[in-house]
Amino acid sequence: MRQQILDALRTNERFDLLVIGGGATGCGIAMDAATRGLKVAQIERNDFAEGTSSRSTKMIHGGVRYLEAAVRRLDKAQYTLVREGLHERGAFLRNVPHLTNRIPLVTPLYSWLDIPYVYAGLKLYDLLAGSRNIGHSSLIGRKEALRRFPFLKAEGLKAGVVYYDGQFVDARVAMALVQTARHAGAAVANHVAVTALLHDDKHRIVGATVEDLLSGDRWDIHARAVINATGPYADAICKMDDPEAKPILKVSSGIHIVLDSRFVPPDTGLLIPKTDDGRVLFILPWQGHALIGTTDEPATVTDHPRPEAADIAYLLNHVRRYFNIEVSEKDVKSVWCGIRPLVFDPKAPDTSHLARDHVIIEAASGLITISGGKWTTYRLMSEQAVDRAIAVAGLTPARPCRTDDLKLWGGENYRADGDAGLVRTFGLPPDVARHLNSIYGDRAPEVALLCHDGGGVRLHPDHPYVEAEVVYAIRQESAVHAADVLVRRLTLALVDRAAAIAAVPRVLAIMVTELGWDEERRRAEEALVLKRLNDAI
């Protein structure tokens, strides 16, 4: 499949749109443009969602913190940000039903004065969601809060508030976007890098020179419009276009740690909206484990930011401070670090107000750059970026944007009870069937068929991931490195790093068979994936 995609990218015909970047925004743009009928090329120099987009908080939310800022400061921009986020949250949950879920979140209250303030704020949060509200906030007493979270600090606890947001599997949603874009006709490739931007004699951008990082082949892609959707690397592409371009990014890093499921109820999360040092702390159930985050530290842009021991200690210390939990470094099953790009308008007089929203900038050459925002609003960001490209390049789409109610790949005929059919038809264990149904949606029978043909062996006895998924990732989902498989297609490394390391030999054996690697390549891949798993996912 990958070779066919590369052949499509090498065509001498000009594309309507070239998208640089394969994270949430880039994949969303490619999907939006392709489903409008535009001829689209998209390239990502690493793997899809290898950067920030697979290291998120896994939440689909409007932004409760931003609502508080909007009310306290009468800030219309923050108010709009929350309202748009809640609208997009509803679309996200509806359009990707197999990879998302609604989750109740408990906020404990330790002051009587906080109760009416927080409760009123969360009822406003519900109100702003309008017809796309996913649950009604409610006040619960001290006893009920402790029943839901027995390990909450009981001393001084007065009550709690329950509200609702969404949750998702970020790397898999990125893959659903890729598959939807491809199905609509887009040529989308990972591990292909931009080496130079192409300009005409008027210095208008007309495409890019790219390199296949696996073969070393180089060629030109010509396009009527080019969008820079590279997240933390947006400044680098802007500089490639214009060496005098002003930077638009300030970045910080945030880490998340994963613990065993015993540290969190299976269906309820807990949020501390403001710790004693002003940060947000949460414990969420995710993929059968407990996800805890997050930190916010100054950072430099790098492909695989390494979690610092001090940041892990910070999270564990705050968990012990707010909850009656005995937890230490030995309980951490996985940890990852993501880069948060905050953007500002380069024409602004200063950088004191960094945007939590996204920014779309058109350079003199016509290069369109979009950066900032969050996973929740990827669809809206993509729509606006494609609209801008259409206006700038005079493109003529065959149809208007249709992503507000478009089911992504795997979601069209998804059934929440589809796992029962997988058990009956293919004889799968119930936990494996549940896993395949929730990850692949209505495409799960394709993976199950590979299980039936001998791929039903588990990669690790403690988890439902099976060998058939490795084969499917290679044949259908453009996985070319073992880390592509273990970190992003299966997400095993994100929940249990030790289990992922144990699965490396079998994953490599399957890839040798499927991709025809020689021993030298296998050893190189083994070294690469072990370095990634032991150092920085």
Image (cartoon, helix red, strand yellow):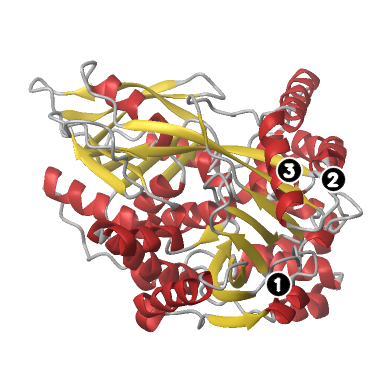
State which mark lies toward you, 2 or 3.
Answer: 3
Give the secondary structure at mark 2: helix
Q: Which mark is residue 160?
A: none
How far apart marks 2 and 3 lie (CA) works out to: 13 Å
Q: Which mark is residue 267?
A: 1
Q: Identity of the amino acid at label 3? A: Asn
Label 1: how many Cα within 10 Å (few below 14, some 14–19, many 20+):
some
Q: Which residue is mark 3?
A: 317
- Camera sees residue 225: yes
Give the secondary structure at mark 3: helix
Q: Locate residue 438, reporting x and y percent.
A: 67, 68
Q: Which residue is mark 2?
A: 331
State which mark lies toward you, 1 or 3.
Answer: 3
* 414 in relation to 354, above or below: below
Q: Identity of the amino acid at label 2? A: Asp
Give the secondary structure at mark 1: loop
Q: Locate residue 262, reporting x and y percent.
A: 84, 61
Report the residue at 28% width, 58% height from top: 73
Asked whether, in this view, residue 193 is left or right of residue 390, the answer is right
Q: Locate residue 240, reporting x and y percent.
A: 29, 20
Question: Relative to the observer, which residue lies in front, 331 or 32?
Answer: 331
How far apart marks 2 and 1 lie (CA) works out to: 21 Å
Quadrant (top left, top right, bottom left, bottom right) of the C terminus:
top right
Report the residue at 65% width, 62% height from top: 439
Report the residue at 33% width, 68% height from top: 83
Mark sitting earlier along the chain (2/1): 1
Query: Mark 1 and mark 2 in contact (Cβ < 8 Å)?
Result: no
Query: Mark 3 and mark 1 in contact (Cβ < 8 Å)?
Result: no
Quadrant (top left, top right, bottom left, bottom right) of the N terminus:
top right
